[in-house]
Amino acid sequence: MLLSKISKKLFLFFGALSPALVFAVETPQDFKGFLGLFIGIIQLLIPVIGAISLWMFFKGLIVFIKRSGNENEYKEGRQLMIWGVIILFVMVSVYAILNIFYGSVFGGRIGIPQLP
């Protein structure tokens, strides 16, 4: 139930963000341009996903500590912490895979994501 609430909020957030991402980019002329566009969009989303996963982890930690007497809320906090760590791991893995892929196609590195 809690994950469905979070997924609805994430869907609304990324749905509202998608027109800005789509209209702010140039049309790719070849496959290499398409890959650069795709990697650029993913690179913009990495810090956002990282922030969301850290927020989930710390919210779960607070619920875990604060509600340790209640078994159901204790489990809810534990689940939030587990999902936060899983999302953070997946985000870092995707970033590493994109960096390897970018290096093999374009001959460089992506670098650490910076805030605009």
Image (cartoon, helix red, strand yellow):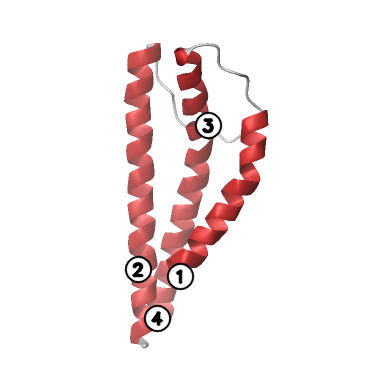
Specify the amino acid type for callout 1: Leu
Front position among marks 1 and 4? 1
- Crowdedness near tag 3: few (<14), some (14–19) or many (≥20) residues, C-alpha within 10 Å: some
Instruction: Write down the residue under mark 3.
Output: 41
Q: Is residue 35 left or right of residue 11?
A: left
- Image point 43% across, 80% down: which residue? 66
The answer to whether residue 12 is above or below residue 113 is below
Q: In terms of sequence position, does the residue under pointer 3 or pointer 1 come before the other? A: 1
Label 2: few (<14), some or many (≥20) within 10 Å?
some
Residue 26, image x and y in percent? 63, 20
Pick the front one: 50 or 42: 42
- Disc 2 marks which residue? 79
Identify the element where label 3 is drawn.
helix
Is 34 positioned to the left or the right of 65 in the image?
Answer: right
- Whole-angstrom CA distance, mark 3 to mark 4, is 36 Å
Up/down of 50 relative to 25, above or below: below
CA separation, marks 2 and 4?
Answer: 10 Å
Question: Which residue is disc 4 drawn over?
Answer: 73
Question: Which mark's residue is nearer the viewer, 2 or 1?
Answer: 1
Secondary structure category for the residue under label 2: helix
State the separation of the CA atoms marked 1 and 4.
11 Å
